[in-house]
Image (cartoon, rainbow, N blue to C red):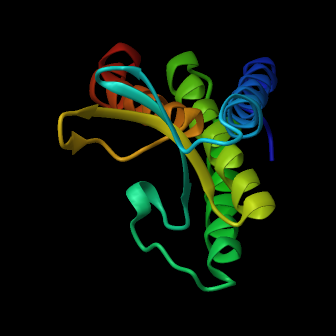
Amino acid sequence: MRLAAPTLFYKMCGLAAVAVLLDQVSKLLVFRVLMVNETERVILPIFSLVKRYNTGISFSFLATDHEFGPWIFAALATIIALGLLIWLSQTAERLPAIGLALVVGGAIGNVTDRVREGAVMDFLLFHWKDLAWPAFNLADSFITIGVALLIYDGVFGGRKRA
């Protein structure tokens, strides 16, 4: 397989690695340093740090206590990340490459949790009175931003290249 833009590919692999590192360090700090003996710390009236373990996919969808659950989800996410790396290797445009790198980095960050902890470690919680968005982490944020960049490029980037 020939890389479309080798320098861009290597830089984006570096970006993915930085995303994994930031994700894992943030989880270590929250779960093992800041909140050792607590499950929730209110930071602002609309934001708290929490300690949550997600055994499912996004927002605990398909959550399971089955012993093979984390391994199945980790394998699925790894296969997807490898497919995205192949896509990245064929990408010569910067914006979709950044999007792909962020998605890959986020996926690897969450796979690392599943393998090490048996679940994804979530700690960011936005809430208003009794309403709350599901807890998430930096890996989830990187995935969301990456997908948004890919959608933006898909909608608006094609005109520039056409």
| Residue sitting at the far top | 160
In percent of width and height, residue 9 lies at 75, 27
Question: How many numbered circles does the render carry?
Answer: 0
Residue at 76%, 52% (x, y): give it. 112
| Residue sitting at the far front | 37
Q: In the shown orientation, is residue 148 left or right of residue 12?
A: left
Depth check, front residue: 62 or 36: 36
Q: Is residue 53 visible?
A: yes
Q: Quadrant of the C terminus?
A: top left
Q: Is residue 86 visible?
A: no
Residue at 65%, 35% (x, y): give it. 35
Quadrant of res 10: top right
Q: In the shown orientation, is residue 43 left or right of residue 110?
A: left
Residue at 62%, 78% (x, y): give it. 69
In percent of width and height, residue 52 lies at 53, 51
Residue at 73%, 19% (x, y): give it. 8
Q: In the shown orientation, is residue 146 left or right of residue 15?
A: left
In percent of width and height, residue 42 lies at 43, 27
Depth check, front residue: 68 or 96: 68
Up the image or down, 34 lies above or below 83; here it is: above
Up the image or down, 108 lies above or below 150; here it is: below
Depth check, front residue: 26 or 31: 31
In percent of width and height, residue 123 lies at 53, 39
